[in-house]
Image (cartoon, grey):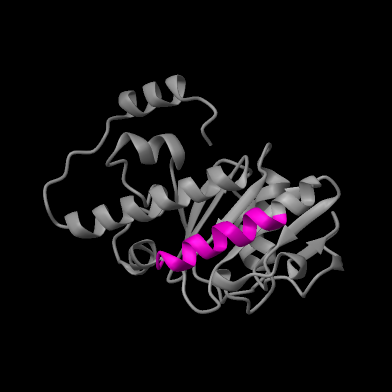
Amino acid sequence: MSAETKARDAMARWGKSLFDRGLTGGSSGNLSVAVEDGLLITPTNSCLGFLDPARIAKLDSEGRLLGGDPPSKEVFLHRAFYETRAGVGAVVHLHSTYATALSCLAGVDPDDCLPPLTPYVAMRVGRVKLLDYVRPGDPAMGEMIRALNGACSAVLLANHGPVVSARDLDGAVYAMEEFEETAKLAVILRGAPTRLLTEAQIAELGQVFKGMR
């Protein structure tokens, strides 16, 4: 089995898992994986719970469609991560409930919108930038991510949802799951006195668990 075939099968398997667990619904959300000669990305208006591996879109390095169905309209944000963050092999974007709720709240720190409540979010996700709202599919989404120059492995799109990048699809999904669980904690704890990890504790985690992102 070729590496591309394995990647297609993994995208369908993880898509169904995310859909079955209620982390994405309807035709929302999109996944992408870098392959040797381009990029695989879920088709536009497709349901992650019912992906056909053979119909997943394949793009070349310039974003031209090589095969499969037309790509997600949010391909711009995926390509921006691959182009600016070294070592990225997969990107996951969902409209999961608590992360999306966090993206709608006023008063969230735009430079660090996912609070470091647990060591796991620091290890797998890191500091998350809240990006200004633009309509879904607007190429400006990609430009905002490019403007970060690879500084963040994850972002939160205002009034929209989370985007996470990682070295491979497994890692991107695990990070997205941690993002959603931490957003749930943040919403539950909102307004309550909260103890966050210190900068020193976060730095220690970065040294000990280097490379998790």
Left or right, residue 142 beside residue 170: right
Which residue is drawn at the image coordinates 65% and 50% (left, top)? Answer: 81
Q: Above or below — where is 139 with respect to 89?
A: below
- Is 184 one of the magenta-colored residues? no
Judging depth in this view, the residue of 33 and 19 nearest the camera is: 19
Which residue is drawn at the image coordinates 27% and 42% (left, top)? Answer: 117
Whether residue 111 is visible here, answered yes or no, is yes
Give the residues in magenta.
8-22
- Toward the left, the furthest residue is 193
Q: In which quarter of the image is residue 208?
A: top left
Which residue is drawn at the image coordinates 78% and 45% (left, top)? Answer: 3
> In the rendering, at what x and y percent does residue 121 appear?
37, 41
- Toward the front, the furthest residue is 1
Whether residue 95 is visible here, answered yes or no, is no
Judging depth in this view, the residue of 51 and 96 nearest the camera is: 51
Q: Above or below — where is 159 with respect to 212?
A: below
> In the rendering, at what x and y percent does residue 198 appear?
28, 30
Left or right, residue 116 beside residue 171: left
Q: Quadrant of residue 55?
A: bottom right
Left or right, residue 125 beside residue 62: left
